[in-house]
Amino acid sequence: MAHDFRMPSLGPDMESGTLLEWRIKPGDEVRRGDIVALVETDKGAIDVESFAAGTVEKLLVAPGTRVPVGMVLARFSGAEVQAAAAPEEAAPAAAARAEQSPALAEPAAALAAAATASAPAQRQRISPAARVRARQLGIDPAQVTGSGVGGAVTLEDIARYAAAVAASPPPAEPARAAPDMRQVIARAMTRSKREIPHYYLSLTCSFLAARTWIEQYNAGVGIQGRLLPSALMLKAVALAAQAMPEFNGFYRDGQFIPSASVHVGMAIAMRGGRLVAPAILDAGTKTIDVVMSELRDLTTRVRAGHMRSAELTASTITVTSLAEEGVDLIVPAIYPPQTAIVGFGSILERPWIVNGTVRPAPLVTITVAGDHRVTDGRAGARFLAYIRDALQAPQRL
Amino acid sequence: MLAVNEIPVPARRVTYREAVREGLRAALLRDPKVFLMGEDIGRYGGCFAVTRGFLEEFGEARIRDTPLAEAGFVGAGIGAALGGMRPIVEIMTVNFSLLALDQILNTAATLSHMSGGQFSVPLVIRMASGAGRQVAAQHSHSLEGWYSHIPGLRIVTPATIDDAAGMLAAALACPDPVIIFEHMNLYNMQGELTEAAAHVDIERAAVRRPGRDVSLITYGASLYKCLAAAEELATREVEAEVIDLRTLRPLDEPAFVESVRRTHRAVIVDEGWRSVGLAAEVGMRLMERAFYDLDAPVQRVCGVEVPVPYAKHMEEAALPQVAQIVAAVESMLAHGA
């Protein structure tokens, strides 16, 4: 069965990407999960994995080409598509793209369709005048949703799309132009604050037990195996999300869709003032040492500009921490279409009353921002308490 | 325009019939070589009463009643034209003209070509066409498209009062045979006859109503259905441009191509049958010349492909109607259908 490998959507605001490098060549056997290409996006260079297994038949796009999301990059023959894994991972991107292009809204569905139908893709319905206008304006008609008879793209659709593009920041034109991370963040956060009715709750708790346990643990391992507080925080949030699934998933098309898996996104600062939140996949079911090693690996790769496509699109909830910056607390904005984000302030020595006595203790203020369309403050309070309690029993993390 | 309104001076309010009559009378008065020939045009005054009183005014030599023999009197007209006269031949309806088709096609349209340009045939033939008066299938057809197929002829379709009065002079000035189609539904229509009638051409199409959203391309009596449709569309904020082709051969292609390049949509309205007709020709020219400017498939609103029925309701059902034109335009503008 033939399979089209397409430019994936690696974030809710991604419209196009530049193919930097092929990691495959015609004749290669590709397994599911293999990295097949390196793609430059606004977030940096991403290693793109394949959802399908098969033999590479043809590479259709040359390195250095900027192509829209959804465009076919390569063709595999004898392909088997793991449809089950794809939808969840592609979901956040799909939700964001839905506004623009129903045809491309569900990459996973498209993959499945490509796998089951060997017939060539139907030619886009577009009026001759619209095609000419699109070419004049440098618009790829495949990105435009048709509103004419039979779904045909008309002049009006092109004009509307052009106006929308003009209103949003233009994509970097030259293939290797510096991606404008600021604009990407601006779009995502503007959407967050425009669409999501946030509520915020915070509590302060002792980090003493956690710190003591980390010190004991680290005494027994080499430098490479040492734990950092962020691993415990991340794991605690993962467990809370497992226990309270209403905080774990996506808000799409007017309803909350919980996710069966817990993929915790971790906000990581990159060089040059960039910020991404790639996911530790299935963080709730991984042991703390695995979470730590993955976190270390992720941080290293993010800072080197090497992320995998699945990591960028999979997060079902996000954790952010400004521990190193000395802030007391952080009031974060939810990353759409997720419905919750947990912020950790710095761990600071403060007076803390234990059994009627004031003592110095490491304290951390944890904040949750929740989507009021899905949960409310009472649930948020329980969610926060779960995280706090988990941090008080670090040996169980 | 021809809407019922106050009459500005010096424009005069006349019927289409009177306008045609004024054109004929002016030609007779201006040029002694001009004469009229046809069935019942003299004593009876013409079957549509266009030539009433001409026999008394101009005499039998110039207003000649003919036998019911179309091939004969059209042939005689060709001979007179070759001999230096300026005959105006009237055929009652286009249906009867088929009896003279051999003369029109094989002789009038052909002689100039066959003689290497040595002989021209400056013949003018007037005929009534079209349906809507319950005169049934043998008197109601629109065969303008058939005649427009023939090289060597010029085909004109006056739809307005000025054109009804003025096209004749231009036709007489033409060295080649010209057929003037007068839609029989128009004879009683009233409107202003203006000085512009003295200067009308038989070369160019006319924009009868400007618009930006769709071009309604038509000729003859269908012009008024298109104008009515445009009025109705305007209430829905759709601005239709109405093009009156005026001359069907040769077609003023740049005129309607230019219009469609602006509006990006076209509906062709033709009382003639749809298949292999004039609307098909106009549509094909748009494909050739304006394809990349089209934002929707070109549409046709044409006569139903049956002999025109006698019964009133069936006759109406067989002809293009305003509602159909409006519906065709709306279907092109419909979103997400």
Image: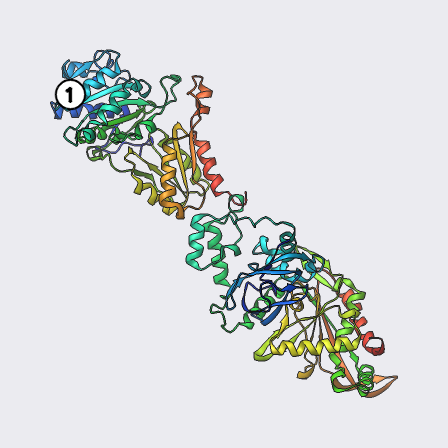
Chain at numbered mark 1: B
- Nearer to me, B55 or B175: B175
On the image, numbered disc 1 is attached to which residue? Answer: B80
Residue A82 is left or right of residue A387, and the answer is: left
Image location (x, y in percent) of residue A99: 58, 56
Quarter of the picture holding the C terminus of chain B: top right
Image location (x, y in percent) of residue A354: 86, 84
Image location (x, y in percent) of residue B116: 17, 32
Q: Is residue A140 above or below residue B277?
A: below
The type of residue carrying mark 1 is Ala
Q: Quadrant of residue B158?
A: top left
Residue at position x 41%, y 57% in the image: A136
Residue at position x 39%, y 31% in the image: B276
Q: Is residue B34 above or below residue B207?
A: above
Specify the farthest residue to the right.
A355
Image location (x, y in percent) of residue A212: 82, 85
Residue B198 is left or right of residue B190, and the answer is: left
Specify the farthest residue to the front.
A27
